[in-house]
Image (cartoon, rainbow, N blue to C red):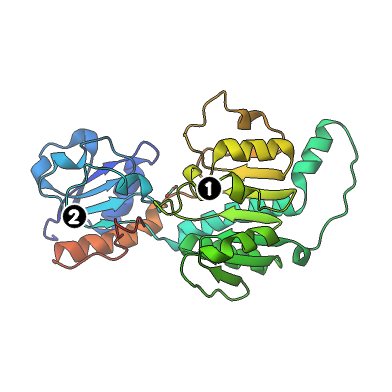
Amino acid sequence: MAAPLGTLVFYSEFDDFDTWKHALQAQLPALQVVHSSAVARPQDVHYAMAWKPPVGFFQQMPNLRLIINLGAGVDALVARDDLPPGIPITRITDPQMARMMAGYVLFAVLRHARDIPYFEQAQRRGEWAYRHPRAPHEVTVAVLGLGQLGATAAHELQRQGFRTLGWSRSPRRIEGVECFSGMESLDAVLGQADIVVLMLPLTPQTRGLFDRARLERLRPGAAFVNVARGALVDQPALTELLDSGHIGSATLDVFEREPLPADDPLWRMPNVLITPHLASVAIPESSALQIAANIRRVAAGLAPDNRIDASRGY
Ligand code: GLV
């Protein structure tokens, strides 16, 4: 029998505990995996795998060695002031999660590129409203944020034949994608795009980056897709620009406040598609491999992979 590895505590309101427990124990049979509501001996907990745990969560466990963010974005975690100092934090960077995200982005971009929102509205009016399709190369898509998720999505979009622009903080190269970097090029990228896809991490530098002035840089009638974080965008300005038609349509998976309040005007806008923050999720079977590898590393006294830099914010 393998030597015990200690205990991992799990917390998420959105992910299924048993599925994760089985996926982790398939990799690490010697690991105890317990739900946060059933921790008998907090001093035995070495690993915490959590998505948006309550305030004070980590402080109950004096012997923590690793915090595993149960997702790609770490903004909610690094913004907390109750993190135990010096404990490494990792995030999930899983190719399967990137595929799931690329699928959502592809769906949203194809929907806008093929004017499906226009036909949906025409159908509701019982109208045969012919609008000649644009060829893929006539449609320019800008992917803002070229981390693992953004780069995978940009790659898929260029495979579809769209003219694909990519923008990121530091320079990147993706075959078939015209890549730009640095704040000085952002407005020029926005001004060329028929469809803008937000895939940036939320950091102190990107919070509110898409304010009214910047949103007004979008081409009249452009489509806007946000699968990143709501707080990147001035939501009231976005709503007004969608209402005026300056922004033609939007697919929004993330919002300033989640759940999006029932009285928010976005719910009732015919040119807006809303999904409840699920464009991509952490996938147990594939993510468990990297989580298990990191637990083995930490148990052996090594630094984990995919460690985040809390000061950088991702
Ligand atoms: C979801 O939004 C994530 O960051 O994993």
Label 2 neighbourhood size at 10 Å, few (<14), some (14-19), many (20+)? few
Q: Is mark 1 within 8 Å of ligand 1?
A: yes
Give the quarter of the image for residue 193: bottom right
Q: For the residues carrying marks 1 and 2, which lies nearer the camera in this image?
A: 2
The residue located at (61%, 71%) in the rendering is 177
Residue 219 % position (x, y):
72, 53
Q: Quadrant of the N terminus?
A: bottom left
The mark that comes first in sequence, 1 or 2, is 2
- Compared to residue 56, the image places residue 217 above or below, namely below
Q: Is residue 43 left or right of residue 81?
A: left
Question: Circle 2 sits on which residue?
Answer: 87
- Compared to residue 275, the image places residue 30 above or below, namely below
The residue located at (32%, 62%) in the rendering is 290
Residue 182 % position (x, y):
50, 66
Question: Circle 1 sits on which residue?
Answer: 279
Q: Amino acid at mark 1?
A: Ala
Q: Quadrant of the C terminus?
A: bottom left
- Compared to residue 295, the image places residue 246 above or below, namely above
